[in-house]
Image (cartoon, helix red, strand yellow):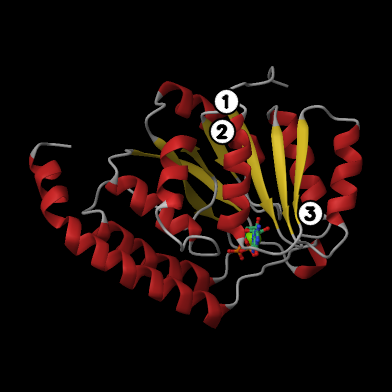
Amino acid sequence: MSARSRTHLVLIPSYNPGRKVFETLRAARAQWDPVWVVVDGSSDGTAQGLEDIARSDPGMRVLVRAGNGGKGAAVLDGLLAALSLGFTHALTMDSDGQHPADRIAAFMAASAANPAAMVLGEPVFDASAPRIRIQGRKISNWWANLETLWAGIHDSLFGFRVYPIGPLVRVMRSSRWMRRFDFDVEAVVRLSWRGVPALNLPAPVRYFGPEEGGVSHFHYWRDNVLLTWMHSRLFLGFVARLPLLLARRTAGG
Ligand SMILES: Nc1nc2c(ncn2[C@@H]2O[C@H](COP(=O)(O)OP(=O)(O)O)[C@@H](O)[C@H]2O)c(=O)[nH]1
Ligand SMILES: [Mg+2]
């Protein structure tokens, strides 16, 4: 395992993931130190189990939110705590085992070599991926690319990423949205608007059936309404910034 990093941490927002979170944590800890889990008002008993592990593992930390605030709200809590301890970059990953913990070191190395950038996972799907989610993704990616004038975001939704913490906290403080499932997309678009370049690295993603302990809190209608509203908002922001984005593009940025 690598020595403890004082600049880069792994941050795992978690909401009712069941037993998968323990596998995720173990896999992440085998790659990185420190790893923090933000338990977002889970009612599945995982907060207790995680706190038990943390007592004997100084490389991990558990933050517990009393109520469910959403993925973005949980990430923001973790970012603020990390910032106060001097961390500069956070790799976010899901708690449900879908993301490739064995890519953590490579993503962190890319971030260390390019500290001004955000390092974005580009999902590599296998046969387990539901078609409807892949299709929905293409629509969101098209909008995100338009909104950033094709600044280099390969995937707008994938949550396996390294963010520079300072710029992300500034972006989140300036928006009262981005607290739920709209976090991942709005974060990359707004960071791109601020001039944060995107580096894209492939990362395999897996979908588990319920018999394998797979859980999803994605609700097709609720979350697609949220994403549609988010892209409407971002489109207006894009129109307002079009002169700036065009000037940047002409300057070769
Ligand atoms: N903190 C927090 N995390 C959430 C919430 N909903 C989902 N997540 C986390 O966000 C990640 C992705 O959510 P998930 O339900 O797996 O969506 P899917 O993978 O797109 O089907 C997982 O790590 C979840 O634990 C929430 O309300 N709060
Ligand atoms: Mg998931």
Q: How dense is the environment of label 3, judged by Cα within 10 Å: few (below 14), some, or many (20 and up)? A: some
Would residue 163 be visible to someone looking at this image? yes
Q: Quadrant of the C terminus?
A: top left
Asked if residue 43 is positioned above or below residue 86 in the image, the reply reads below
Asked if marks 2 and 1 touch (Cβ < 8 Å), the reply is yes
Secondary structure state at the residue bearing disc 1: loop
Q: Left of 43 or right of it: where is 196?
A: left
Which residue is located at x 77 percent, y 51 percent? Answer: 21
Distance Cα–Cα, label 2 vs label 1: 5 Å
Q: Please tell me which of labels 2 and 3 falls first in the chain.
A: 3
Tell me where residue 187 appears, x and y as whole percent: 43, 52
Secondary structure state at the residue bearing disc 2: helix
Q: How dense is the environment of label 1, judged by Cα within 10 Å: few (below 14), some, or many (20 and up)? A: few
Secondary structure state at the residue bearing disc 3: helix
Identity of the residue furthest to the top in this view:
3
Q: Please tell me which of labels 1 and 3 falls first in the chain.
A: 3
Tell me where residue 51 appears, x and y as whole percent: 87, 43
Q: Nearer the viewer, mark 1 or mark 3?
A: 1
Tell me where residue 13 appears, x and y as whole percent: 66, 51
Q: Provide the residue designation for mark 3.
A: 20
Q: Identity of the amino acid at label 1? A: Gly
Which residue is located at x 46 percent, y 29 percent? Answer: 111
Q: Provide the residue designation for mark 1.
A: 86
Query: How many numbered tags mark residues here?
Result: 3
